[in-house]
Image: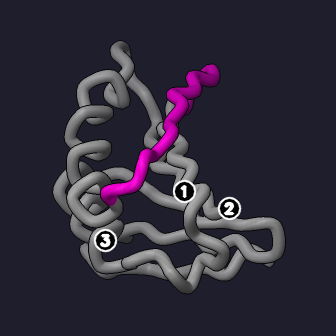
Amino acid sequence: MVHIEFYTFKDEYNPMDKLKETIIDSISLNYTDNIKFNVNKKDDECSLTINLDFLNNIEDVDIFVLEEICHENEIYVQVYDSNTKKEFYYDESDEWIYKDMD
C-alpha cells in the first residue's frame, strides 16, 4: 500500500478543509479505484493522507500530478510505503525539491 500525505501549516483556519475536495478530485482523475483518505489536524499543521491500496510501490505514483497539486495549492507532499519515504515541495524560489527521507 502507498500513502500520499499532503500537508500545510495552518493559520487561523484549517486550509485542508478547503483543499480536501480539490486534492481528492485531482487524485481521483488519475486513480479511479476506490481511494481512502483521512484529514489530520495537529497544533500547527494539517494534513490529508490518501491511501492507495492498489499500489505496491511508491515508484508507481505519478509525481507530476502531485507536483501540480502542490504548486497550485502551495502545500507539501510525502509519499511513502513500508520501505521508502520521499518528500516533495516547492522552495522559496519556486523550485520543485525532492528529499529522500530514508
Check contact, mark 3 vs mark 2: CB within 8 A. Answer: no
Quick check: 16 left or right of 41? left
Q: Residue at x 72, y 67 (%)?
A: 81
Q: Residues within 10 Å of mark 1 (few under 14, many from 20)?
A: many
Kind of residue sitting beneath label 3: Glu
Q: Residue furthest bottom?
A: 59
* Residue that numbered label 2 is attached to: 1
Mark 3 to mark 2 CA distance (whole Å): 21 Å
Q: Secondary structure at mark 3?
A: helix
* Image quarter of residue 42: top right
Q: Amino acid at mark 2?
A: Met
Which residue sits at x=48%, y=38%? 48
Q: Which residues are magenta?
A: 32-45
Is residue 92 visible in the rendered image? The answer is: no
Q: Amino acid at mark 1?
A: Leu
Most foreground residue, 16 or 10: 16
**Which is closer to the viewer, label 3 or label 1?**
1
- The residue lying toward the viewer, choosing from 22 and 44, is 22
Residue on which the image places disc 3 = 67
